[in-house]
Image (spheres, helix red, strand yellow):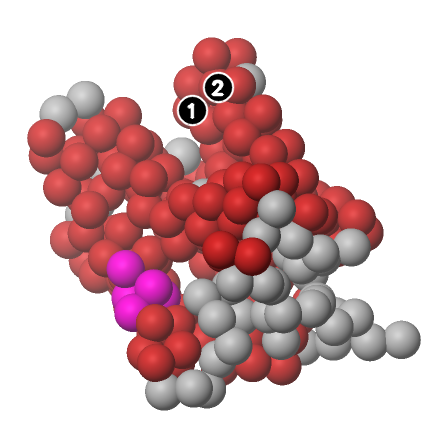
Amino acid sequence: MTFSPPAPPAFADCTPRQKAARLLSDALAPAHTVVALLLLVGWHSTGSWNGLGWGLLAAFFCGLVPIAVVTLGVRRGALTDAHIRVRRQRIAPMVLSLVSVAAGLGLLHGLGAPREVFALVVAMLVGLVSSLLVTVGWQISVHMSVAGGTVMILLLVFGPRALPAAAAAAAIAWSRLVLRAHTPAQLLAGTALGGASALTFALLA
């Protein structure tokens, strides 16, 4: 049976619980999380503004371009919403995002980006390819794929100090369940896929 997430009600018509879930789901959307993670790891890679600049360059290709692709698709009516509720509509934006991330990776390599930044973008590319392959046949949670990968990366970079990030990931999962955007299996699969993809970072950093 094909999973079809229901259209969310207008924000004004949401219950307080649904409003909280909507705010969490929007604020911690995959592209937003990707941008924040790249800036944080970019800074950590050199401990200076130079590293932050590398993170910003990577964030342009890995986060800002995908945001622009989805925004344009929503405005043209090709996509249901910023979270692309319908699975089949996700394929084209994910492919375009994949091209953007690959282009950014090539540029980072050519310019000699810090190892941590380069390794993180490789891990993001692996995660995106994996999510795309699953999405062709099944609606995995991209929110949780990115959240799971983010928690793993933060633990690899910062150690136990990053454990509170797991609470943020749990909050994202809660929000997607409340909004009926995914089944528990889709959320767990996304988390596992993201965490596994992030291990690429450990091999390269």
Residue 175 pos. (x, y %): 62, 44
Between residue 175 and residue 92, name the one nearer to us: 175
C-alpha separation, residue under disc 1 versus residue under disc 2 = 8 Å
Q: Is residue 65 magenta?
A: yes
If the image is split into quadrants, where does the C terminus sit? top left
Dot 2, how many residues are within 10 Å of its Cα: few (below 14), some (14-19), or many (20+)?
some
- Pointers 1 and 2 in contact (C-beta within 8 Å): yes
Q: What amino acid is labelled 2 in the image? A: Ala
Q: Which residue is at 27% across, 25% downward?
A: 44
User: Dot 2 lies on which element?
Assistant: helix
Does residue 105 appear left or right of residue 199 in this picture?
left
Q: What amino acid is labelled 1 in the image? A: Val
Does residue 191 appear left or right of residue 91 in this picture?
right
Residue that extends furthest to the front in the rendered view of this protein:
13
**In the rendered image, the vertical position of residue 162 relative to residue 147, given as above or below:** above
Which label belongs to residue 157? 1
Per the picture, the main secondary structure of the magenta-coloured stretch is helix
Residue that extends furthest to the left in the rendered view of this protein:
49
Q: Is residue 140 magenta?
A: no
Residue 180 pos. (x, y %): 71, 56
* Residue 112 in view (yes/no): yes
Q: Which residue is at 40% across, 54% downward?
A: 31
Residue 13 lies in quadrant = bottom right
